Amino acid sequence: MNVSETLSEVKNYIDGKFERNGQNSMDVLSPLDGSKISSIPLSTIQDVDSAVQAAKKAFPSWSDMTFKERVQIFFRYRTLLEKNMEELTELVQLENGKTYGEAKAEVEKSMELCEFAVSIPQIITNEVQEVSKGVECRIERKPLGVVASITPFNFPNMVPHWTLPNALVLGNTMVMKPSELVPLSTVRMAELLKEAGLPDGVFNIVNGGKEVVEAICDHEDIKAVSFVGSTKVAKIVYKRATSNLKRCVALGGAKNHLLVLPDANPEMTASNVVASMSGCAGQRCMAASVMVGVDKVQHIIDRMVEEAKTIIPGENLGSVITKEAKERIEGYIAEAEKNGAKILLDGRNATVKGKEGGYYVGPTIIDYVTTDMSVAREEIFGPVISILRAKDLDEAIEIENGSNYGNAAAVFTQSGGLAKQVMERASAGMIGVNIGVPVPREPFSFGGWNESKFGVGDITGRSSIEFWTQNKKTTIKWNPEAKTNWMS
Ligand code: NAD
């Protein structure tokens, strides 16, 4: 894919204009083959301030528009996502390394997120009640002002859409900081939003790394910060933003456990587990990372290995994001092997003909992992699954409960009673029953537990409406003849 001029040198997007002011820059490489595809500015505190000032200036007129007017823009924007589907898909592939199908699914999900956003006016009709004779109380949801969204590398198109459409439809203006590894999709989002009629300043992008994130957490005019990324950074962002008295929801990493019971449907279970661990090269916060096999499940494991052998890097498996990520993932596999685990399928040293500079790891299945091994506890973020064995369901649930994370958990069984036990007792925010990637779809909200999320509420769906708004309570009396029968 040949990238356009605006994409070959990424600029910040402030007040409706793309600009670059001689900041230091960083190269953007395609993980598909390691080639340079673009560069970004490493922005400064001043750049963040310029974006916030633009968003602040745009806020009064944007928030003064009716819901109806604001959602019209997102109806048009959703259509533009559809119209530009092929290009947006190729862009995700280029900067993130996904397969065509995975990249396209991501853009389709972004459209779905816009569909939820345009339905918000139907959901929030506000509340009114006559609380005393002639006295009425009403609650209205009002926007917060300038808000910020900080995003990770693994879904360059979808994760920005977790926050942007909802926050804007609800009347806020936004500063976004995309991952420095995948800045291109966001540029096209800005262009398409402008084409859809979004007023200048309502949406702004500041590129860069840590300094930009810190400046966002510190800026006194930013009212709320949403973050999606690793747990290490989620903790830093949550602490810094809230200590500066901002609202914050910070989603972190994951170590998702899939509990496989002996009565599970072997075919469905094997294909679900393998798709969950290898889809998006294992770089999904909902990916299966640990499989806990309860009692006799060897027949399912055998099937998983056969199924995983059909997943070929460069064909139906994309790349991981960087050379460092490949080295980290391969390091985990080597360490597990050294500590006595058995590698049933080894994805190390994968290469793709003609793309020797790309960062590929094949699907990897590690058996006889014990709870003390790092592959059982730490987020690997690659197409790797660790199999632990449990004698019964109680032990399997105990293993799951022992994780510091709590994004997703799933159970594979044909018994409703046993599934219910996992639904009740798993310590995770999103549970799957015979589903390997249990992402709740709108209007249900997305968010984990424990160290997979910090803050109150979730990031999408109905829950996000709470996050992006504040309630205004008004008490009204018009008729002097009405005898107020309340306390005051
Ligand atoms: P990351 O934490 O390295 O980066 C996320 C963002 O934080 C980026 O914009 C980055 O520039 C910034 N950042 C990085 N280091 C920083 C620092 N020291 N101080 C301030 N800001 C910093 O995450 P990533 O590698 O881009 O994404 C992968 C991680 O995201 C995985 O852990 C994955 O599980 C997680 N993730 C979680 C969810 C979820 O819903 N829970 C969704 C997607 C990804």
Image: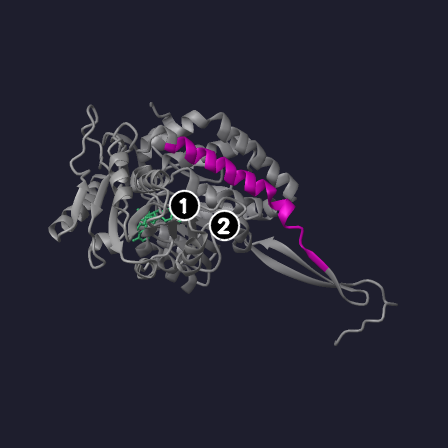
- On screen, residue 302 above or below 471: above
Q: Which percent across, then down, holds residue 427?
A: 39, 59
Magenta-highlighted residues: 102-128
Q: Residue under circle 1?
A: 434
Amino acid of disc 2 = Ser
Q: In terms of image quadrants, where is residue 248?
A: bottom left
Residue at left offset 33%, top offset 29%: 8
Instruction: Answer left or right for 394 relative to 164.
Output: left
Q: Residue at x 36, y 28 (%)?
A: 100
Q: Residue 262 vs residue 117: left or right?
A: left
Q: CA distance from mark 1 to mark 2?
A: 20 Å
Which quarter of the rendered picture does the N terminus lie within?
top left
Percent from the top left, x then y, of residue 297?
28, 47
Q: Is residue 13 left or right of residue 479?
A: left
* Label 1 CA crowd tier, 10 Å (few <14, some 14–19, many 20+): many
Q: Residue furthest bottom?
A: 487
Q: Is residue 301 magenta?
A: no
- Ligand 1 neighbours mark 2 (CB distance < 8 Å): no
Q: Amino acid at mark 1?
A: Asn
| Secondary structure mainly formed by the magenta segment | helix
Residue nearest the observer in this picture, 486 or 480: 486
| Secondary structure at numbered mark 1 | loop
- Spot occupied by residue 153 in the image (x, y as percentages of width and height): 34, 42
User: Does 245 appear above or below 486?
Assistant: above
Q: Is residue 131 visible?
A: yes
Where disc 2 sits, the SS reads: loop
Residue assigned mark 2 = 445
| CB-based contact (under 8 Å), mark 1 and mark 2 | no
